[in-house]
Image: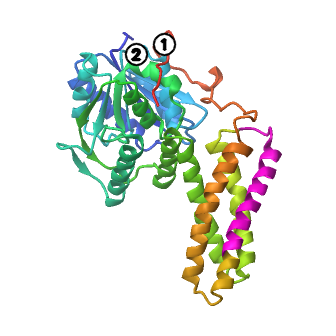
Amino acid sequence: MEQPLVEIAIPVFNEERALEASVRRLHGFLSGFFPYRFRIVVADNASEDSTPHIGERLAREIAEVSYLRLRQKGRGRALRRVWSRSDADVLCYMDVDLSTGLEALLPLVAPLISGHSDLAIGTRLARGSRVVRGPKREIISRTYNRLLHLTLRTRFSDAQCGFKAGRAEAIKALLPAVEDEAWFFDTELLILAERDGLRIHEVPVDWVDDPESSVAVVPTAVADLLGIARLYGELMRFALVGAASTVAYFLLFLGLRPLLPALLANAVALGLSAIANTAANRRFTFGRRGGEDLLRHHAQGLFVFGLCLALTSGSLMALEALAPAAPRPVELGVLFVANALATLLRYLMLRLWVFGPGRDRDALAGPAQIGPGELGDLQGWAPCPPRPSPTHRA
């Protein structure tokens, strides 16, 4: 097959019902209305149904279709693999359900081919977009993008639209710096591109939500929030872990309080949440992996827990001495303030002592590597020379 100008990746996982119809529809549109040479790549990240058989058959039957199979899940992992090997000038991806109107594809890639822009994204949140989807997804999407604007100062309007493209040179320079291998992958790519001063073109799209989409909304949202926190910085990651452990602490305390005295319920709830807090901060906030120093970290974490327990228990004892008949809301209010102080103390102790700069650190795990044996046949690809990674500004 002649080298394509535009390559479109379709990441899939267990999409046996939608894959063939979507690929044939996309191929028909491109053959009839798209003026550039193209290739469609079905990027299968560890499907467990008949998706591999369908993808392989489509690659045999249609010259412009290729099939790539990975043995590990992750939309970002699949896109990384496809894009890093592509010989096309413009790299795109779209969701398999083709929720975005295909007439937006030419406006998406045209500024990339002309050199006007480095990346291009479809947006459902701009004037001129026409969107049909349920209120839950609408609220989640707008909240997520607003959070990106507030925390990471992003300017692009829609990070989650499954309709993106970029000049191969720009994307391949960014790929080594992108850590996520799943749903946050393309958001992280956009954030890094914006920080590097690359030009991001936005195209208003027509979008009809697929009610049978296989995307799990809640786990995806959680993964996206963790990705935001990772890019925001260490303090934000600690705050996110602290917020989660505080919620867990209060739920445990409320569940144990009818069964145990206040001091004992507080000790048990704080102890259980502290163990989880240390483990989460060890991996997520301070980037320690593996078993090295694991016991020391948890032992010192328990010491920090003891200090926090003394602070919160002391506040309860003071409340009991000053107001023995204080109602439950007052008790919870005192605990809330005490826990806020304990959280600050915990951060300082973890940052300066448990995981302090003088301690040996395990290297952060880089992107997962996939061996040659984990790939299926891929038609018509030639290796591309490595490109230098850009320097990213904080």
Q: Position of residue 379 (x, y in %)?
A: 47, 17
Secondary structure, magenta segment, majority class: helix
Q: Position of residue 390 (x, y in %)?
A: 46, 19
**Mark 2 lies on residue:** 169
Foreground residue among 55 and 47: 47
Q: Is residue 96 left or right of residue 263?
A: left
In the image, residue 137 above or below residue 65: below
As for residue 23 lying within the magenta part, the answer is no
Kind of element beneath mark 2: helix
Quarter of the view holding residue 157: top left
As for residue 290 lying within the magenta part, the answer is yes
Q: Badge 1 local density, few (<14 within 10 Å), some, or many (20+)?
A: some
- Amino acid type for the residue under numbered disc 1: Arg
Q: Badge 2 local density, few (<14 within 10 Å), some, or many (20+)?
A: some
**Mark 1 lies on residue:** 387
Q: Furthest residue to the front?
A: 322
* Residue 135 at least partly seen: yes
For the record, the magenta segment spans: 289-315
